[in-house]
Amino acid sequence: MRLADIMTRDVEVLHPDDSMEKAAQKMRDRGIGFLPVCDGKRLLGVISDRDMAVRVIAEGKDPRLVASRECLSSPVKYCYEDQEVSDAAQIMHDEQIRRLVVLDRHSKQMVGVISLGDIATNSAEVISGEALQGISKPPDSTKPI
């Protein structure tokens, strides 16, 4: 099964100048924990709810005053929409992440997002189980967030 068959296409994004408060509101309103940060069509990075907790809240910063450009994770881990679901699961396993940006192979533009939940509910259980096992390992403390 290809990623294009199960990925989320209607992706909410942040502008690099958007505040972390706005990011939190978008996450709350959409029931998500991950937002790509784009300047026009250019993907700059991503922000997860964990990024927000560790880089803003834990540091005592005011989420109304911190711009998304200050908290994003980059470079972005990604896959292509024509790849197999197992390819995305392997990347998630190897990188210990739960979500990936999906790009069009030709234009290199973002066309969606794939999550471990998408894989678990739409493909073979063994794939998501293997990915979850790798993602759930204790993190390497030398690896950036």
Image (spheres, rainbow, N blue to C red):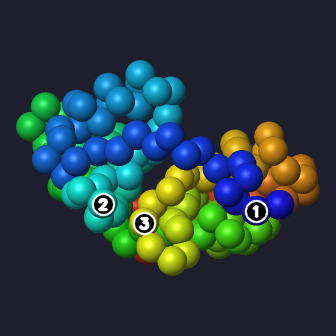
Could you tell which of marks 3 and 2 lies nearer the N-terminus? Answer: 2
Outermost residue on the left side: it is: 65
Q: Quadrant of the N terminus?
A: bottom right
Crowd rating for badge 1 (residues with CA inside 10 Å; few <14, some 14–19, many 20+): some
Outermost residue on the front side: it is: 106
127 vs 6: above or below:
below
Which residue is the site of mark 3? 109
Q: Position of residue 66 (x, y in %)?
A: 14, 43
Residue at 50% over, 57% down: 111
Could you tell which of marks 1 and 2 lies nearer the N-terminus? Answer: 1
Which residue is the site of mark 1? 2
Left or right, 96 with respect to 122, comes to left
Q: Toward the viewer: 53 or 15?
A: 15
Could you tell which of marks 1 and 3 lies nearer the N-terminus? Answer: 1
- Label 1: element kind: loop
- Disc 1 from disc 2: Cα separation: 24 Å
Total numbered labels? 3
Q: Quadrant of the C terminus?
A: bottom left
Q: Amino acid at mark 1?
A: Arg
Q: Position of residue 101 (x, y in %)?
A: 51, 59
Which residue is the site of mark 2? 41
- Label 2: element kind: loop
Q: Amino acid at mark 2?
A: Lys
Circle number at residue 24: none
